[in-house]
């Protein structure tokens, strides 16, 4: 005699989604797909407002690794800040420009390459011409598809009391370097948002009154 199966037991199985293979083939039922958790690594990892944050602060290249989920695509928010420019030579030298600052969102399908730019070196008291403050280095992120974001390093500051007037000019960059002062004049501030992007990644530098 065949084992007794109640209609209640059969209904209970279907309410719980526990269909046998014959049920699947005849009724066209689709088993639910369980989502794998999204895993990520790289930089310094933390959580804020239910979001996972990866902070990359060491200069040079690194990688944000992402895996898991269902579709294999992931939405990220990014903040990319470049290195600041170095300050100009001598008293009254222009300050270095801030590194470019860019933020937005993107969809990626795999690892993201991260490069953190270093700050530029300032200049000491040497009076030699063409001895200019160094710009900051670029920071960038690139990933699968069209993701490619670069923030430009800040411009170096202009020198003061320089034998060459162009040396007093601030340099262009993500934000422009400040102008250096001269005995009766001053250099010109460096242009910001160079190269131009929208929205702007930084501002122009400031002038410096003659001493």
Image (spheres, rainbow, N blue to C red):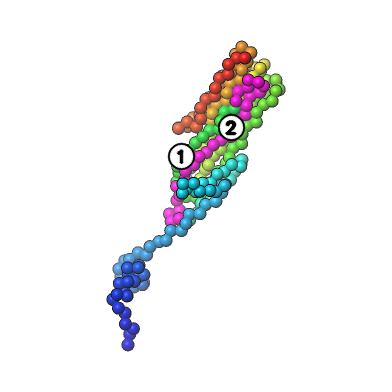
Q: Quadrant of residue 96?
A: top right
* Quadrant of residue 20 within the rendered picture: bottom left
Q: Residues within 10 Å of mark 1 (few under 14, many from 20)?
A: few
Figure quadrant of the C terminus: top right
The residue that appears at 52% across and 43% down in the rendered structure is 142
Q: Residue at x 50, y 48 (%)?
A: 47
Alpha-carbon neighbours of circle 2 within 10 Å: few (<14), some, or many (≥20)? many
From the viewer's side, name the closer residue of 15 and 111: 15
User: Residue tagged by mark 1?
Assistant: 104
Residue 66 is tagged as none
**Residue located at (52% from left, 52% from top):** 40
x%, y% of residue 59? 61, 40
Q: Which residues are magenta?
A: 69-95
- Residue furthest toward the bottom? 1
Quadrant assignment for the N terminus: bottom left
Q: Is residue 168 visible?
A: no
* First in residue order: circle 1 vs circle 2: 2
Q: What predominant SS class does the magenta segment belong to? A: loop
**Residue in the picture at 31% in, 66% down:** 28
Say whether residue 57 is visible: yes
Give the numbered dot on residue 84: 2
How many numbered marks, from 0 up? 2
Residue 36 vs 19, above or below: the answer is: above
3 magenta-colored: no
Q: Position of residue 171 (x, y in %)?
A: 58, 25
């Amino acid at each position: 005699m065949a084992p007794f199966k109640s209609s209640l037991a059969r209904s209970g199985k279907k309410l719980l989604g526990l269909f046998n293979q014959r049920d699947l083939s005849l009724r066209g039922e689709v088993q639910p797909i369980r989502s794998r958790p999204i895993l990520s690594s790289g930089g310094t990892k933390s959580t804020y407002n239910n979001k996972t944050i990866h902070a990359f602060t060491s200069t040079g290249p690194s990688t944000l690794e992402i895996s898991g989920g269902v579709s294999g695509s992931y939405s990220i928010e990014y903040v990319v800040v470049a290195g600041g420019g170095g300050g100009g030579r001598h008293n009254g030298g222009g300050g270095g420009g801030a590194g470019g600052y860019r933020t937005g969102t993107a969809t990626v399908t795999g690892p993201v390459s991260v490069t953190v730019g270093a700050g530029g070196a300032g200049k000491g008291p040497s009076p030699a011409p063409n001895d200019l403050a160094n710009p900051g280095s670029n920071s960038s992120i690139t990933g699968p598809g069209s993701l490619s974001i670069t923030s430009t390093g800040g411009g170096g500051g202009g020198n003061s009391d320089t034998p060459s007037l162009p040396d007093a000019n601030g340099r262009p960059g993500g934000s422009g370097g400040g102008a250096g002062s001269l005995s009766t004049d001053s250099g010109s501030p460096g242009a910001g948002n160079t190269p131009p992007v929208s929205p702007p990644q930084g501002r122009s530098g400031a002038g410096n009154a003659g001493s």
